[in-house]
Image (cartoon, coloured by chain):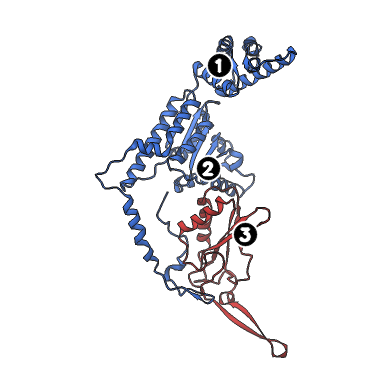
Amino acid sequence: MSSNNRPRGGPQPGGETPARIGFGMSRPGRDPAGSDPPEDAAEEKKTLPSDARVDLAQERAETGIDQVFTSLDADLVGLAPVKNRIREIAALLLVDRARAKFGLSTSRPNLHMCFTGSPGTGKTTVAMRMSDLLHRLGYLRRGHLVSVTRDDLVGQYVGHTAPKTKEVLKRAMGGVLFIDEAYYLYRQDNERDYGQESIEILLQVMENQREDLVVILAGYKDRMDSFFISNPGMGSRIAHHIDFPDYTLQELEAIGQLMVHAEGYNFTSEATETFREYLKLRKEQPRFANARSVRNAIERARLRHASRLMDDDEPVSKSELTTLTPEDLRTSRVFDAQPSGPASD
Amino acid sequence: MRITQGTFSFLPDLTDDEIKAQIQYALDNGWPCSVEFTDDPHPRNTYWEMWGLPMFDLADAAGVLAEVNACRKAKPEHYIKINCYNANYGKQTVALSFIVQRPSHEPGFRIERQEWHDRTIRYTLHPYAADQPHGERYANGQQ
């Protein structure tokens, strides 16, 4: 947080301090500068002597970021490069905090980010964690996430875009503005598209109000790349380009297990085998959306599980209610898919 | 003469940090803020001109302050105030309203006397600034 007062836009009416006559009440003229020294003294006290030592581990504990990291590790499978980058950012901000204790000035790091990756690789999930993390580290004042797409930023007629974009930006102040599928902001084929106007306003705020919000753009890699080629200003203002890798088979399986447990179900050991087989086949098929496809597959399995129990028309036990069997998965069209047929979960 | 209307008007002018803290207080209470300006300082002039629409769903004061600064830039010699509206049932009224900018020179008011029937005198308040046409009322003919 900036502690110094920003210069006022308008002239300082209080500058010349005219006699304050307010309906019979008069204040003794107070020298505005008179109140400053005590504040400065308080500031002075806070800075540590140069031979002091700061315990970074304790700083870490104070911010509570370890909780964020633990839940990040527990809830998000894989994504090693992403987690590494988040750790680096956290370390930088922690060190900056420690530096501030010694009164060392640090320029505010640029934390605008771009998340690229295939569908279902966890870009939105990580963005939510990121806002929480940055809030705990004291980089963001509020730590909320405002998630928008082109629709929320770009207007429909002349003069509609600027107020719309500004309103969204104002809502995001103090938190993270997450722009999903950001490349839609720029339409190459239509040079009179209002998206360009929105991009210009975004750029201006990203540059001038860095302390107020963090912008995270997300989208597919190839399309984001061409977006940055046509908007070089945007590319250079984003410090962190983070690529979300596709999940491996083991990771997908772990994600599936996590989701199943979160829903209060279990796989039998045969079902685990079948699930692995399913993932192997599904991964090769078109329109595979990583974790999202896994979620869909589990939703379908739950449907089949439910209708199987209904068809049996017998009283069910708790274990039957919570156990997914191979046949719930086996009936999926993925197993008898023709290469040309449309993929379905 | 210093106009005293709204909250904090008997205090010295608030700094930007103080304004920000007040806005944050309003937002934390769930009161949306709006920015208004005028060059007619008459105390009964309740309807100031709106600087954009009221701002809803804001979490942080920086958004409101940005609008205030934009308004200050466009209207450097006007009165500007922030209104915070409490929409709760049973309240539905402005909960906090305070001036965040004043013209550099405030000429004040004169009393006007009107002769009425039976030698009655009626009094009214007239701002010196209002002698000038709208838009030319304060300092150097600035808008």
Q: Image check: A228 left or right of A323?
A: left
Check the rendered structure and report the hue given to chain B. Answer: red
Q: Say which label, 2 or 1, has the lower sequence index.
A: 2
- Identify which residue is drawn at 45% across, 65% down: A12
Q: Chain of mark 1?
A: A
**Label 1 SS:** helix
Give the colour of chain A.
blue
Q: Quadrant of the C terminus of chain A?
A: top right
Measure the C-alpha gap from mark 2 to mark 1. 36 Å
Residue A334, horizontal then vertical, whole percent: 62, 13
Helix, strand or loop for disc 3: strand
The subunit letter for the residue under badge 2 reads A
Circle 2: element type: helix
Residue B134: give x, y in percent of width and height. Answer: 60, 70
Residue at position x 55%, y 72% in the image: B137
Chain of the residue under label 3: B
Q: Is residue A196 above or below residue A254?
A: below
Mark 1 highlights which residue?
A283
| Label 2 vs label 3, nearer the camera | 3
Tell me, yes or no, whether dots 2 and 3 are on the same chain. Answer: no
Q: Is residue A344 visible?
A: no
Q: Is residue A2 above or below residue A85?
A: below
Residue kind at label 2, given as amino acid type: Ile
Residues behind callouts 1 and 3 on a single chain:
no
Q: Are marks 1 and 3 in contact (CB under 8 Å)?
A: no
Q: Which residue corresponds to mark 2?
A: A199
Residue B94 is labelled as 3
Question: Does any portion of residue A294 appear in the rendered image?
Answer: yes
Viewer-nearest of discs 2 and 1: 1
